[in-house]
Amino acid sequence: MRTRTQIGIVGAGPAGLLLSHLLALRGIDSVLIETRSREYCEARQRAGVLEAGSVRLLREVGLAGRLDRQGIEHGGIYLQFAGERRHLDFRELTGRTVTVYAQTEVVKDLIARRIADAGEAAIQFSVTDTSVTRLETDTPVLRYTSEDGVQYEVSCDAIAGCDGFHGICRPAIPASELTVVERGYPYAWLGILADIPPSTDELIYAHHRRGFALHSLRGPTTSRLYLQVDPDEDIANWPDDRIWAELSERFALPGWDLKPGPVLDKNITPMRSFVSAPMRHGRLFLAGDAAHIVPPTGAKGLNLALADVAHLAPALDGLVRGQPDKADAYSATCLDRVWRSTHFSWWMTTMLHRTPGADDMEAQLQLAQLRYVTSSRAAATSLAENYTGLPLP
Ligand code: RFL
Ligand code: PHB
């Protein structure tokens, strides 16, 4: 079946979903397709921390009803190292805060809103055979097969590749047109979701000789915790008791206990830094993880995805109305923020993780840096400014 839309969007993660909403607010039509089912997209456990600018953006576009009721505002974090837990007060240092609200909840809110505004057909879930072609022309084409087996060919004014790191859009750009800068890390995160009230009021980032650990949360009765493990570690080697024992050791502090509880979900995530540039080829625009990946230590990936589409919506609006300047500036504008976040995420990661086989120099340099960011107001302010995020357009 041949159809037409203004913007074809590939991928219903946070980037693609928010983009379709921002375009609709501007009166621009889009077709949004997703390979996974709605249930899968709404259950996938991922990020948890929204920057101040992301919260403000979601509020401005009418998407913060539940976020304002259920999100938990955090004025700082703890950095734990050398047997001490020190607080960094973001509110006092920068006047800004972050909000703990799970990516899954952001995704649920976005899906519900698109379907309420535009009907069930607003998002085509469970599609197959996605492809994007004719990218160098003014009428790029998006092809897919719908869940009920109909083959679609959608002629578009532009296509947004919001299909994550493993999607098809970035590989549709000739490799000779892209510069890819990439670094893998010799560790991964084992993450658990646990049915137990958090043992802390704010996130704890812990440096430990056995490796990094992070205590985060999802709500008053749900905790989210992470452990540094080897990248080739098998989750089968980590029964729940072993995970809690390891977490307790890495967070140990006299007079404080980590409360264990039933594990609802567990998985292992590899860590990498990856930037592919430019973020545009002809009439294909990449946004979010499709163009860049950061290790999760700085809590930046979701926020970068939202920031990209905050720039992309006005850029595409201009393009379809014959004013291409913002579309022409899109890639360079986004890459500034992407590289700032890439640096911050790399810096937090290397300050807090233990490289397998590392000498004492690594640990001593990390401890010196941790003492510095928790004792110098200038250094603490720099961390706080990066963590709470740069302003959005
Ligand atoms: P997503 O969320 O990967 O969505 C892409 C969507 O595209 C679909 N797709 C396709 N659809 C159609 N056709 C195709 N051919 C397709 N191929 C793929 C996929 O099914 C998917 O639904 O990318 P997006 O929208 O760019 O969003 C990026 C974020 O999801 C990601 O950056 C964050 O989750 C990263 N991240 C964190 N970010 C933060 O800002 N704060 C955090 O605290 C944080 N913690 C994390 C994280 C990521 C983690 N993992 C598991 C990678 C913690 C973890 C453990
Ligand atoms: C999370 O809550 O999932 C989370 C929080 C902070 C991070 C990464 C993940 O740096």
Image (spheres, rainbow, N blue to C red):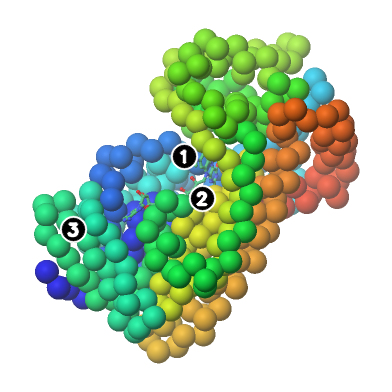
- The answer, for residue 209, to whether it is visible in the render is yes
For discs 3 and 1, the disc positioned in front in the rendered view: 3
Q: Is residue 244 left or right of residue 207?
A: left
Q: Amino acid at mark 2?
A: Leu
Mark 1 and mark 2 in contact (Cβ < 8 Å)?
yes
Query: Secondary structure under badge 1?
Result: loop
Of 72 and 278, nearer the camera is 278
What's the residue type where badge 3 is placed?
Thr
Q: CA distance from mark 2 to mark 1?
A: 9 Å
Q: Is residue 173 above or below residue 378?
A: below
**Percent position (x, y) of residue 317?**
40, 78
Residue wearing tag 2:
302
Q: Secondary structure at mark 3?
A: strand
Q: In the image, residue 34 lies at what x, y percent?
A: 29, 53
Please identify the quadrant where the C terminus is shown. Answer: bottom right
Q: Is the C-beta of the residue carrying label 3 under 8 Å from the nearest atom of ligand 1?
A: no
Q: Element at badge 2?
A: helix
Q: Nearer the viewer, residue 300 or 212?
A: 212
Residue at 17% over, 56% down: 146
Circle nearer the viewer, 2 or 3? 3
For marks 2 and 1, the one nearer the N-term is 1
User: Would you name the residue on which mark 3 appears?
Assistant: 145
Asked if labels 1 and 3 touch by Cβ distance under 8 angstroms, the answer is: no
Residue 52: give x, y in percent of width and height.
59, 52
Q: Work out whether residue 92 or residue 273 is closer to the camera in this orientation and state it.
A: 273
Category of crowding for the residue at label 2, using alpha-carbon neighbours closer than 10 angstroms: few (below 14), some (14–19), many (at least 20)? many
Label 1 belongs to which residue?
Answer: 46
Please state which amino acid type lies under the numbered disc 1.
Arg
Picture quadrant where residue 254 is located: top right
The yes-or-no answer for disc 1 within 8 Å of ligand 1 is yes
CB of residue at label 2: within 8 Å of ligand 1? yes
